[in-house]
Amino acid sequence: MIRIEEGKDNEGDAAYTPIFAFIAPDSTRILFKDATSPHRDEWRVGQETTAVYNPSDPWDAKLLNSFARFGDAIVMMCLAMPLLVLGGGYYITRLLIGARNEYFM
């Protein structure tokens, strides 16, 4: 990270945006911003991290963190778990009650 930009968020509170830089394979210096944070101490100037980018468009770089890697899967699991519990509960209840009452639907 090369610097932190200070600004205000939509509610007028302090917001900090870290600015990162890397050198693309064609020796171009690429600058990009990460998500704005309300805490200045999340990043330190000079701190290194991992970024991913499309070689044909290195200006569209993003930090590679846990949420970037697994965020979609985590959201889908949060949506699927209640459905699995409900569906599994229905299936087990149907097996248990259905064994006693063949007219159970």
Image (cartoon, rainbow, N blue to C red):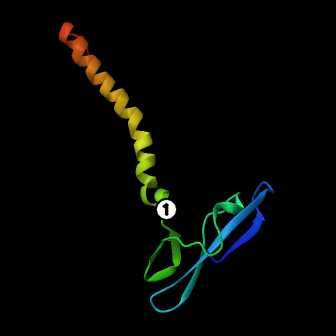
Q: Residue at x 26, y 21 (%)?
A: 92
Q: From this view, report whether residue 69 is shown above or below residue 33.
A: above
Q: Secondary structure at mark 1?
A: loop
Query: Of 45 and 32, which appears nearest the observer?
Result: 45
Query: Of 5 and 102, which appears nearest the observer?
Result: 5
Q: Residue furthest top?
A: 100
Q: Quadrant of the N terminus?
A: bottom right
Residue 62 location, x and y as percent? 52, 70
Location of residue 43 (image quadrant): bottom right
Q: From this view, report whether residue 15 is shown above or below residue 82.
A: below
Location of residue 84 (image quadrant): top left
Q: Residue at x 67, y 60 (%)?
A: 37
Query: Of 84 and 6, which appears nearest the observer?
Result: 6
Residue 38 location, x and y as percent? 71, 57
Q: Residue at x 55, y 73 (%)?
A: 48
Can the viewer see residue 101? no
Location of residue 105 (image quadrant): top left
Left or right: 50 as drawn, with respect to 91: right
Can the viewer see residue 72? yes
Q: Residue at x 51, y 74 (%)?
A: 61
Query: Of 65 and 91, which appears nearest the observer?
Result: 65
Q: Residue furthest bottom?
A: 27
What type is the residue that disc 1 sits on?
Asn
Q: Count the marks.
A: 1
Q: From this view, report whether residue 33 is shown above or below residue 10.
A: below
- The crowd level at tag 1 (other Cα within 10 Å; few <14, some 14-19, many 20+) is few
Report the residue marked by disc 1.
Answer: 65
